[in-house]
Amino acid sequence: MGRERWHSRAAFVLAAIGSAVGLGNVWRFPYMAYNNGGGAFLIPYFFALLIIGIPVMIIEFGLGSKMQAGPSYALEKVKKGTGWIGWGAVIVSYLLVAYYAIIIAWCWVFLFKSITVAWAGHEKVFFFEKILQISKDPASIGGFSVPVLIGSLITWITIYLIIFKGLGPIGKVAKITVILPIILLAIIFIRGITLPGSIKGIIFYLQPNFSKLLNAGVWISAFGQIFFSLSLGMGVMIAYSSFIPRDSDVNNNSFITCFANCGVSFFAGFAVFTVLGYLSYATGQPFSKVVSSGIGLAFVVFPTAIAKMPLFKSVFGVIFFMTLLSLGINSAFSLVEGFITNLRDLVNISKERASLYVCAGAFLLGLIFTTKAGLYWLDIIDHYVANLGMVTVALVESILVGWFFGVDRFRKMVNETSEIRLGKWFNVVVKYIIPITLITMMTKYYYEEFQKPYGGYPVWCLVIGAGLVISCFVISYFINKKAVEKE
């Protein structure tokens, strides 16, 4: 079975950018910047990009390209017995995409409802009670939310139709789903800047508060934002780069992908905050009262602003949720592709059958998130996937390349085929700075968990959430063991 190839370098780069640029670029980055020093947040953010984001991206692109294998087999070639970490990455990512698809399902519902701006005047009730039909606690499953269930089914059918024919269609779709949201964000920005109060929103977004830079939590937030927004530690970047030739320009591709992702995040902040500035003006509330994070920003606050617009409410609603859909779908099918790549490296199975089984399995796995308690479980599991799963994978990758494969050897290997040459700084970053930073982040996470269990949920819920992520690595160990024995 021959290895698939991207039709062009541009197709690969666009697919990688599409994987990195996701829903978090629109709702998480602007809020993080606002809450952590405004314009001053860009200092730790770009510092984190340079010493964590780009080096880890180079490691993952380099492993995939030079080893010509998916995550588990690439790491197994670096050091025998470590392939289970690669399996852990794709299995954790599979768990992630099972609930990520549910957020996309919400976008389908809102896109349809945008035609009549059905939420107008009761945005919070509309989202939590009419769409999610949320129950009182995680134990009260309460049956399915039919709109979310249908949205999830549409999402998985869409993902399957994109990936089942191989890299050709994926590359073509990536051209649309990367460029389209940028165009749509530009439309949102242009519309937003014409609204009263929009300039106030931009000022709040960028106004620097340099005193925040003395807070260690701001720096950790910046590192976390860079790490998670680039799809690092998920296996997908190793998988995607395994389909480019060994002599590909790893370093240049990494810089392009990272800067494109961060550029979209920065621009999305302008689009979002012009609208939030208008919302502050229209409601007469202080700006701090209308800013919200995560789910609230995308599905309550922004719809509120749309409903209060004087003209073209429906059109603006369609544009906003089309933006979220295109961003979400692109990231989702890339995560699925990472899992399929590892699966097909293990067993001889056609792309069509692998795609069908993997998509159907993820749909079934995600059913718990379509129930009336789904939002609780999504929040719990996302917390542990982010803080336990991906950080662990990236930490091990940097240690394996830095201390076992040999960072000098790796640097020379990628420099041979790259326009941008890495200097000795790369050795220091990979061997010391990345491990120390990620260990610090994990230590902070465990300390906070011990001091105050996450979200005020019952302990048994948190045990299930952490247990699911840990079990992904346990399962990956036995899968890798069987794979090695088979060889």
Image (cartoon, rainbow, N blue to C red):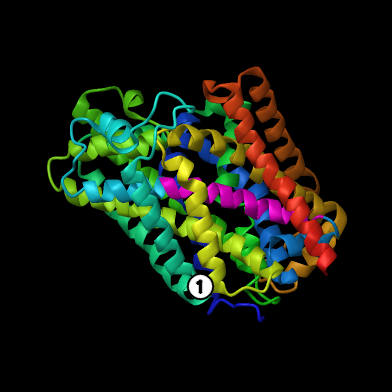
User: Which of the two residues, 139 or 412, is positioned nearer the viewer here?
Assistant: 139
Residue 47 occupies quadrant: top right
Question: Residue 415: in sight, yes or no?
Answer: no
Can you give x and y, in whole percent of width and height, for residue 409 in the image?
84, 64
Outermost top residue: 451
User: Which of the two residues, 92 or 30, is positioned nearer the viewer here?
Assistant: 92
Q: Is residue 197 left or right of residue 470?
A: left
Question: Residue 399: in sight, yes or no?
Answer: yes
Residue 298 occupies quadrant: top left
At a point 66% along the width and 77% down the height, the residue shown is 245
Magenta region includes residue 85: yes
**Start-end of magenta stretch:** 82-102
At a point 41% along the width and 42% down the height, the residue shown is 370
Looking at the rendering, in which quadrant would you find the C terminus?
bottom right
Q: Is residue 416 left or right of residue 348?
A: right
Can you give x and y, in whole percent of width and height, for residue 92 in the image?
62, 48
User: Which of the two residues, 223 or 421, is positioned nearer the viewer here?
Assistant: 223
Q: Is residue 221 left or right of residue 428?
A: left
* Principal secondary structure, stretch drawn in magenta: helix
70 vs 89: above or below: below
Can you give x and y, in whole percent of width and height, for residue 81 in the image?
84, 56
Magenta region includes residue 252: no
177 vs 233: above or below: below
At a point 70% along the width and 75% down the height, the residue shown is 246
At a point 45% along the width and 24% down the height, the residue shown is 137
The residue to which callout 1 is attached is: 11
Q: Secondary structure at mark 1?
A: helix
388 vs 248: above or below: above
Q: Amino acid at mark 1?
A: Ala
Looking at the rendering, in which quadrant would you find the N terminus?
bottom right
